[in-house]
Image (cartoon, rainbow, N blue to C red):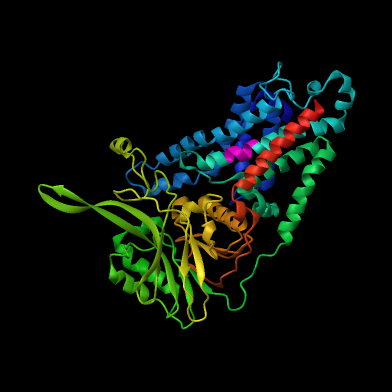
Amino acid sequence: MLKQAFARHPKVAALLAGFASATGFAPLNLWPVTLACLIALILLIQHAPDRRAAFTRGWLFGLGHFTLGLNWIAHAFTFQDMMPHWFGYGAVLLLSLYLAVYPGLATLGTWWLSHSSPARGGGPRSGGGVSPYREGDTPPSSRRDATSPERRGWTALPPLLFFAAFWLGTEYLRAWAFTGFAWNPLGVTLLPTGIAIAATLIGTYGLSALTILAAGALLLAGQRHYRPAAAIAAPLLLLALWGHLAPGPAAPPGAPRVRVVQPNIGQDQKYSVENEVANFRKLAALSGQPRPAPRLIFWPEAAIPAYLDMEPGWRARLASLLGPGDLLMTGADKVYFKPVEENGVITQKLAGANNSVWIVTPDARLLGRYSKAHLVPYGEYLPMRNILEPIGLSRLVPGDADFWPGPGPQSLPLPATLGRPDLKMGVQICYEIIFSGQVIDRANRPDFLFNPSNDAWFGSWGPVQHLAQARLRALEEGIPIIRSTPTGVSAIIDARGHVVHALGLNRAGFLDSGLPPPLAPTLFARVGNWAPFALMLLLAGLAIAMRRSKS
């Protein structure tokens, strides 16, 4: 019955499979459903009659996949009074229509290479509708052997390898093109399985390829092609065992103490002048009383409405919360002005701003600053402002001027004091943490990453998906991550990607803990995204070699 439905309505099947596949992401974490949906997509590619059908099926799968997975974006528009709230649903659909192109390209590339001549490696064979899983790939002299169940199973491997390689490549392309949108890589669905530890070797994009291969192994096993299924499943099972047995490095006695503050200040309260004093009191109370022992105190992104380099009174208020060895890391904007002449009078007009994190000392000095480099289009700046603003479109973050990007990843020094050792802190603000291979200064590796964020925009799905992607960065780089958010999920993540402590959504509180230590640089930390690129070439090369050996 299911086969008949696929055959009669492949487009509907692709759309529904894509929609269901997104349930593998947080908060549902139904990763077996994602694998089942990928099996359906593989079958849909296998039986696609031509290139157009192959692309369309992949595109429809992607449309369903992203529409459900990114539903939280619509919630952000409920805080923007300058645009109708229903624009949010249109934004989700429009973004999904674009992002679906990448799965479409993966299925198109898989179909194309699977139907090309093994000898020439060129375009599709004549009779391109013939499935690569059938006997047409083999000469008549060996047809009897080639059509045995065992041989057909091995013949099925090249298309799976092509698909894994193409998905890896197009997912990387999605994270790069037009400034990139790397949210919800497929590999993040493997976090509950232990297989995610492979990110230490091949990164997140490589992990996505393993997700495709896991689905392929299940499909082969279901078709009773046990040997090729085992060839794929065995290394995946070993990775899962490694992932579950590898302990995360615990904070040793005497580790630097950290306090992570989550004030539960919603987006509707954040920019209210009337609530400014109450909001600061929440942050101050949750930071605790000054103590002799040194602490590192972390506040969320844009936690205070102050320009710290220009307002010594604000710096003094913050310093009054600190003990002699404390340091406060807080989000606050850095603004820039330009002279403007009007009617012969020169005034200073706001030109732009940085979304920054500042380090404040007990004597009210600013020890360092990091400015967000990877900005959110339509959130922190408005592309084509001269065209879009006159028709009523604006960016989601309130303000008249756009944010400007900072220089990129850097490690900020935190000097030793009162028994706390010298530390180096990397910072990735909010959205920046989702970009695999772009989060640390490799020439000056930090001891930990601070990821302040404001996830109050993102409903109930966005914050937990954001946390999952931060866990992958910890795994990839082998360093702990501290997350502070206004409404959740704030967390301390160890260098194996385990959530050591966390504060859930919509609750005020703090986390007190020792800072987990970093691990030695992982393979991925050393070579970055060259590792998944090498995996992509390996998968494609194996597929080509296997097809030629069978031709």
**Which stretch did the figure color magenta?**
166-171
Residue at point 56%, 70% (across, down): 515
Residue 55 vertical position relative to residue 95 in the rendered view, above or below? above
Q: Inspect the magenta stretch and tell me whether residue 169 lies in it.
A: yes
Residue 327 x, y percent position in the rendering: 44, 73
Give the quarter of the image for residue 170.
top right
Looking at the figure, which quarter contains the C terminus? top right
- Residue 84 falls left or right of residue 250: left
The extreme front residue here reads 443
Residue 365 x, y percent position in the rendering: 35, 72
Looking at the figure, which quarter contains the N terminus? top right
Residue 276 visible (yes or no): yes
Give the quarter of the image for residue 335.
bottom left
- Residue 317 falls left or right of residue 53: left
Residue 510 vertical position relative to residue 460 in the rendered view, above or below? below
Q: Inspect the magenta stretch and tell me whether residue 432 lies in it.
A: no
Give the quarter of the image for residue 159.
top right
In the image shown, does 397 or 520 lie closer to the viewer?
Answer: 520
In the image shown, does 57 or 201 lie closer to the viewer?
Answer: 201
Residue 36 visible (yes or no): no
Residue at point 33%, 71% (across, down): 315
In the image shown, does 26 or 55 lie closer to the viewer?
Answer: 55
The extreme left residue here reads 344
Residue 29 vertical position relative to residue 315 in the rendered view, above or below? above
Residue at point 51%, 50% (across, down): 462
The extreme top residue here reads 126
- Residue 372 falls left or right of residue 543: left
In the image shown, does 365 or 222 lie closer to the viewer?
Answer: 365
Residue 278 x, y percent position in the rendering: 35, 68
